[in-house]
Amino acid sequence: MSDDWYVDDSCTNCDVARQLAPGLIEEIGGRSQVVRPPRDAAELAQLNAAAFACHTRSIRRLSGPLDAAADPFPLALDENVLLCGHNSRRTAAANSYLLRRPSGTLMMIDTPRWSPELATRYETLGRVTDVLLTHRDHAAHGRRYADRFGARLWIHEGDLVAAPDADRVLRGTEPAEVADGVVAYPLPGHTEGSVLYAADERYCFSGDSIYWSRSTDALAVAEYVTWYSVEELAASLARTAPLLRFEWVLPGHGDRKHLPPEEMADHLRTLTVRAARLRQRPVDFTAHRW
């Protein structure tokens, strides 16, 4: 605990708060803890973002409830991508995103927690045409958001059990165009039906397949949390990495990162080589390091 802000015992150590409030919230004793009070308005905004994103609402203030007016979501990451916030217990606290298209419409990649109020908030930004699910773990609210928006719901056949009423089903391992400038790359590994969505040669919505690791300062795979096959994930990366060009990696779990595309490509090549040496391990959340 630090000053007015604290993290209660319901924290699941999902890392979302540490992504949004670095230096203010850190991992101590297997969960997030506030390590110091905010020093200025910018740091206060970071703590509020962490609190409103937290799927268990574990980030609290001794002085009273959170101020709804301080909720920053959806939060612009750049001119085309917004972080939805309000992560869901039913998607294991996964991050989700809105992608602006040149036509003025939007796509939602994975989903925040469901509420009509949040749906209205996202709708004010433009018409959402598609809800793109990266894999089964993040599918919980896909149908409700798609129905509310009048949007198409996408998932891969390998994870169809999680969204059997999807409107569009991706098949096999070949890339498929979802919309102009948006391509789905099936990436079996984390789950059998994992998909990476790339947009405009700028954005990589990677689900839980790859993420930016703060501990290694590099692209990484969650080798200790791979449900299907880490060997399949390595093969997927070897097949797909040469086709990809992007500046932003935008995962469901793990940190985001923006780099020049050539530098990001170098990191992706290095990860592909490293992944080829991995072997399947028992799932162990405590062994994972962000």
Image: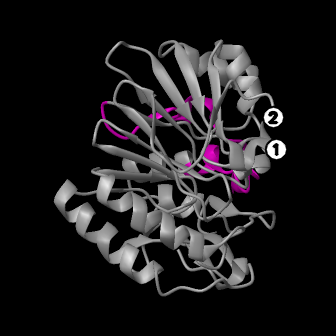
Inspect the magenta stretch and tell me whether residue 74 lies in it: yes
* Residue kind at label 1, given as amino acid type: Val
User: Is residue 36 visible from the viewing direction of this image?
Assistant: no
The one nearer the camera, 199 or 77, is 199
Tell me the residue at 46%/79% (across/down).
275
Inspect the magenta stretch and tell me whether residue 34 lies in it: no
The one nearer the camera, 138 or 21, is 138
Indicate which disc residue 164 carries. 2
User: Which secondary structure class fits the magenta region best?
Assistant: loop
Q: What is the secondary structure assignment of the residue under circle 1?
A: helix
Tell me the residue at 37%/80% (across/down).
273
Contact (Cβ within 8 Å) of mark 1 with mark 2: yes
Residue 211 image point, x, y percent: 47, 63
Indicate which disc residue 97 carries. none
Indicate which disc residue 161 carries. 1
Which region of the structure is painted magenta? 50-79
**Separation of marks 1 and 2 at Cα, in angstroms:** 5 Å
Tell me the residue at 25%/63% (across/down).
265
> How many numbered marks does the figure carry?
2
Tell me the residue at 65%/83% (across/down).
280
Q: Quadrant of the N terminus?
A: bottom right
Disc 1 packing (10 Å; few <14; some 14–19; many ≥20): some
Residue 28 image point, x, y percent: 62, 81
Residue 215 image point, x, y percent: 44, 80
Residue 267 image point, x, y percent: 29, 70
